[in-house]
Image (cartoon, rainbow, N blue to C red):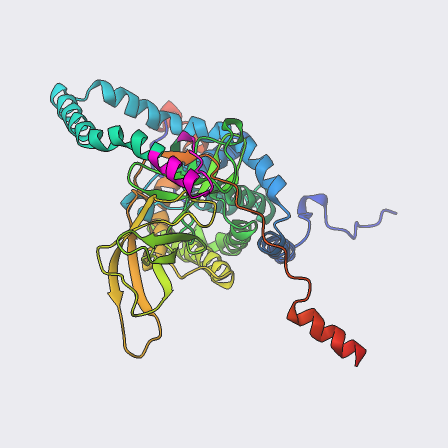
């Protein structure tokens, strides 16, 4: 006599229930989130996946690039000549500065030599094209088409023709990720060009303007002031234009002035950027004095 | 050639080819990386979520929570976001699709779109939760616009992805 099969036929086998799967994968994602934000264990996996996806991303961008390329053939004679005239005028207006620059640079070097200051190191630069901006609305990032293969390293400053765009934060073999100055976790050491007041400009995300924090209300700063990099962080070379002060609120009850500013560089629309080479290596950190307060206290307690 | 409109619920479709599913998911992933800015970026839906949702509803035995999770990881790489953020959102999306699928297909396309909007908003709300827990600033209200354009595209996506499965009408039928 044949037994009736107790198990359902294999047709109905579908593995674990959807809720179990959701729980497993949900927990896995939470573990990944934790591992990535706290410890950054997963950079190698990210690099691997980025290399695999890179050729496909380039293929996707090809139609747009081809259209733009074809479009240049059909730009009118008039537009080209207007463009040319504007560029000539710009070149001419900058000529006095450019011609005077070598002389000033030499004089500066001589003066620095006399005063026995460290020489300023000239920076080299790599031109790069913006591939796409990150879709993530919580961070402000760009992807550019130069990576390790072109000698780009994390921490390099990125500028466009007007001012500072941001900083290279992650380098893949053929592209790199640039965090913009408006990103919430990004800070640029700046000084006010007019008065020389030093401060740090903190990004505040896409929705809000970057701000200068912890400036005393009496400090010499006004709306319209130009902020340039101060160069004391060793990341950004000194003297690059960063932002313009938009508003300065000095309230009597507050211990700090509330200063907001607007980045100068075409952060959302520049198509070409310049990745600057290394600046002068920062001098090594001074040795901590051997007898700082905290350990001495501990030792004293142990003795007593 | 079959007409370019979505099939009625009673219409029997040809079996789907697995390579077509893989291809459409890949294209959607790449469509997410197309450079955009300004208004287009605000309106841009998450194509991958949309296509994934379609396949989760239509082919639950091939595409489920696991596949969605893997695609989410790829999306995290492409977007340079924290690992696991899109993975979590897509896994929940796939689960939601599996939960809804039996009744969603009975509705007309625009009524389906309304339910799709809820699912997409749910998954982007989850991303929002994860990011705010991680210390990100709250985004502008336009954050939700992408999910709504995604839902508006639902009839188009359905028609497009169903098209290769529509049977050729025999001449006698016409």
Magenta highlight on residue A172: no
Q: Please state if A295 lies on the left or on the right of A174 as rendered.
A: right
Q: Please state if A19 lies on the left or on the right of A139 as rendered.
A: right
* Residue lying at the far left of the rendered structure: A78
Which residue is found at the position 27% from the left and 75% from the top? A251
Foreground: A275 or A28? A275
Q: Is residue A215 above or below residue B25?
A: below
In the rendering, at what x and y percent does residue B5 appear? 34, 37
Q: Based on the displayed image, in which of its 4 quarters is residue A200 positioned?
A: bottom left
Foreground: B21 or A260? A260
In the rendering, at what x and y percent does residue B76 appear? 52, 45
* Residue lying at the far bottom of the rendered structure: A304
Q: Is residue B171 above or below residue A254?
A: above
In the rendering, at what x and y percent does residue A133 appear? 39, 41
Q: Is residue A11 visible?
A: yes
Q: Is residue A60 above or below residue B58?
A: above
Q: Which residues are magenta?
A: A107-127
């Amino acid at each position: 006599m044949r037994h009736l099969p107790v198990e359902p036929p294999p047709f109905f086998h579908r593995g674990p229930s959807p809720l179990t799967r959701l729980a497993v994968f949900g927990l896995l994602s939470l573990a990944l989130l934790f591992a990535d934000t706290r410890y950054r264990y997963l950079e190698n996996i990210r690099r691997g996946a980025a290399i695999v996806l890179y050729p496909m991303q380039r293929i996707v961008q090809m139609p747009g690039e081809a259209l733009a390329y074809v479009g240049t053939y059909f730009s009118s004679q008039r537009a080209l000549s207007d463009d040319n005239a504007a560029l000539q005028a710009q070149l001419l207006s900058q000529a006095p500065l450019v011609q005077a620059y070598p002389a000033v640079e030499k004089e500066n070097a001589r003066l620095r030599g006399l005063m026995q200051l460290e020489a300023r190191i000239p920076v080299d630069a790599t031109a790069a094209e913006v591939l796409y901006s990150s879709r993530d609305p919580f961070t402000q990032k760009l992807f550019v088409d130069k990576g390790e293969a072109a000698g780009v390293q994390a921490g390099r400053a990125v500028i466009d023709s007007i001012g500072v765009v941001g900083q290279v934060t992650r380098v893949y073999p053929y592209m790199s990720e640039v965090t913009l100055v408006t990103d919430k976790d990004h800070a640029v050491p700046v000084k006010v060009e007019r008065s020389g007041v030093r401060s740090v400009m903190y990004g505040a995300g896409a929705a809000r303007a970057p701000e200068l924090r912890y400036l005393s209300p009496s400090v010499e700063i006004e709306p319209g002031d130009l902020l340039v990099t101060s160069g004391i962080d060793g990341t950004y070379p000194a003297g690059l234009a960063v932002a313009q002060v938009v508003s300065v609120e000095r309230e009597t009850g507050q211990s700090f002035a509330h200063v907001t500013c607007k980045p100068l560089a075409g952060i959302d629309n520049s198509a070409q950027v310049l990745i600057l080479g290394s600046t002068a290596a920062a001098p090594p950190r001074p040795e901590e004095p051997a007898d700082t307060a905290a350990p001495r206290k501990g030792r004293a307690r142990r003795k007593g | 050639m079959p007409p370019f409109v979505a099939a009625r619920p009673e219409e029997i479709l040809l079996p789907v080819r697995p390579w077509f599913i893989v291809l459409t998911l890949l294209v959607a992933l790449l469509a997410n990386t197309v450079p955009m800015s300004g208004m287009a970026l605000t309106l841009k839906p998450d194509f991958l979520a949309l296509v994934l949702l379609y396949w989760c509803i239509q082919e639950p035995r091939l595409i489920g929570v696991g596949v969605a999770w893997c695609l989410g990881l790829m999306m995290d790489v492409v977007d340079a976001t924290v690992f696991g953020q899109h993975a979590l959102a897509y896994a929940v999306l796939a689960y939601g699709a599996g939960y809804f699928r039996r009744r969603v297909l009975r509705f007309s396309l625009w009524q389906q779109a309304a339910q799709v909007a809820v699912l997409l908003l749910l998954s982007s709300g989850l991303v929002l939760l994860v990011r705010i827990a991680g210390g990100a600033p709250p985004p502008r209200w336009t954050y939700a616009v992408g999910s709504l354009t995604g839902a508006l595209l639902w009839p188009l996506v359905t028609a497009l992805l169903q098209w290769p499965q529509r049977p050729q009408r025999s001449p006698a039928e016409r």
